[in-house]
Amino acid sequence: MNTRSDQNSLGAPPAIPYPAGIRLAGFIERPNRFVAIISVDGRRARAHVADPGRLLELLVPGVELLVEPALVPRRTEFTVRAVRHNSIWVGIDSRVPNALTRLALERRFFQFLPPHESFRPEVGYPGGRVDFVLETDRGQLYLEVKGCSLVEAGHGLFPDAPTARGRRHLQHLIDRTLSGLPAALLFIAGRDDLDSVGPNRRTDPEFADLLRKAADVGVILAAYSCRVDETGVRLSRPLSVSL
């Protein structure tokens, strides 16, 4: 369990540095959602894609990637950490949003959350698991974190593929709020070229309806962008949540 006494301290923006061995590569193809064929050091190699989203607008042949070499022998020699889109890097590692959120909670970086004495990550409940549980004066606050990579005209859209899991998580937050307990949903965009995040109704209309219901019943909704470069990824700015 993590505890802190400096509840009012913002702290430095949380950041996750890339390892010294990070290198540039080119994207060739994606034979399945977890594997990319890349060109690195003048040869072809296999890389793990740690994001199950479609990423159709990002992973196009010839686009530049940041890849991290695997530290142990495995079927994929690298892991894709980011992809260059127009003039920016976009993080596409689905582990990063939760890792950044954990750092932010430790540093009391977020201002949208009520005061809390402690938090725990990855807490199970009957039928599922929540990303974080925060101990507050109103009881345990359940916090779910969703990564967002799809942006259209400066607006982030989640999800980029239908998400039954995401709908279940959101319904659970709604149920807890209706029972009088606090709950929150945080979108973390792996890029800094947007001003808002909202539901992708075209891709998952049921999730969009649930997000509207969540807002109506009092689920806390928040979003942040990230700044990504060759050195790593860090939280950047709060974004509006548009329904």
Image: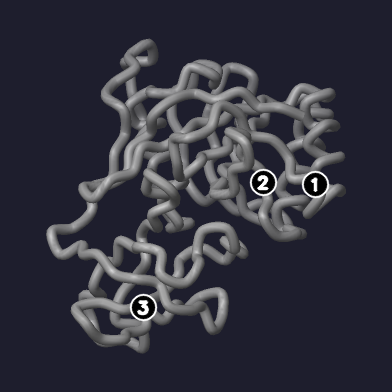
Disc 3: CA contacts within 10 A as few (<14), some (14-19) or many (>=20): many
Q: Residue at x 80, y 46 (%)?
A: 207
Which label number is shown at residue 38? 3
Instruction: Give the total number of marks visible in the rendering.
Output: 3
Callout 3 secondary element: strand
Residue position marked by numbered label 2 in the rendering: 158
Q: Residue at x 58, y 35 (%)?
A: 186
Callout 2 secondary element: strand
Q: Quadrant of residue 239?
A: top right
Residue 10's x, y, as percent? 34, 17
Whichever of callouts 2 and 1 sits on the residue coming sooner in the sequence is 2
**What's the amino acid at mark 2?**
Phe
Which of 172 and 70 lies nearest the eye of the viewer? 70
Callout 1 secondary element: helix
**What's the amino acid at mark 3?**
Ile
**What's the amino acid at mark 1?**
Phe
Q: Quadrant of residue 197?
A: top right
Measured in 3D between alpha carbons, the distance from the residue under mark 3 to the one under mark 2, in whole angstroms, is 27 Å
Whichever of callouts 3 and 1 sits on the residue coming sooner in the sequence is 3
Q: Residue at x 53, y 41 (%)?
A: 132
Q: Quadrant of residue 27?
A: bottom left
Q: Residue at x 29, y 69 (%)?
A: 25
